[in-house]
Image: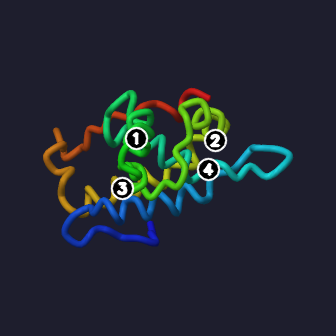
Amino acid sequence: MSYLFKPFKTKLELTELIKHLRTVFKGLPDFRKGAPQTLYTMEDAALSAFSIFFMQSPSFLDWQKHIQEQKGINNVQSLFFVENIPSDNWIMKLLDPVSPSNVFPVFSYIFDALKELGHLNRFKSINGTLLILLDGTQYYP
């Protein structure tokens, strides 16, 4: 598979991963109808959603808004370059209609990087098979 940003030299760089995420997320279908909705882009919604799992905090976006008010900048801006942080409701409204297959390239990108860098070798079992837990999004519409 060919990638615009290939982080496979010696390690998977966060900046290169975010560049790839932005490329994939820019291509997400936007199902909003009517007047142009410019407050939140699909890219910002998807990156905000991704940042929640990256930081592993259920109230991450609210905390980022609080930091923004106090300090004038937040981690979603400085790490993920999100311009406007949408609320949880906006994220769901924008991303729920998007098919999981639209983000499969992100999984492939990370998987290929981890494989090429040798990080998956310790997860191999009998006969060299690789055990990977998937979330099952491809089975439930």
The residue at the point 42 percent across, 45 percent down is 68
- Residue at mark 3: 79
Report the Cα–Cα distance between label 1 and label 4: 19 Å
Q: Which of marks 1 and 3 is nearer the N terminus?
A: 1
Report the Cα–Cα distance between label 4 and label 3: 17 Å
Percent position (x, y) of residue 99? 62, 41
Q: Tell me the kind of residue under disc 2.
A: Val
Above or below 64: residue 15: below
| Front tag of 2 and 3 | 3
Q: Determine the secondary structure under disc 1.
A: helix
Percent position (x, y) of residue 116? 25, 63
The residue at the point 84 percent across, 49 percent down is 35
The dot on residue 64 is 1
Pointer 4 local density, CA inside 10 Å: few below 14, some 14–19, many at least 20: many
- Residue at mark 4: 42
| Residue 121 or residue 53, whichever sits in front | 53
Q: Determine the secondary structure under disc 2.
A: loop
Report the Cα–Cα distance between label 1 and label 3: 12 Å
Whether residues under marks 4 and 2 lie with C-beta atoms below 8 angstroms apart, the answer is yes
The residue at the point 56 percent across, 45 percent down is 45
Percent position (x, y) of residue 112? 33, 59
- Residue at mark 2: 98
Q: Which of marks 2 and 1 is nearer the N terminus?
A: 1
Q: Tell me the kind of residue under disc 1.
A: Gln
| Front tag of 2 and 1 | 1
Q: Earlier in the sequence, mark 2 or mark 3?
A: 3
Q: Which of marks 4 and 3 is nearer the N terminus?
A: 4
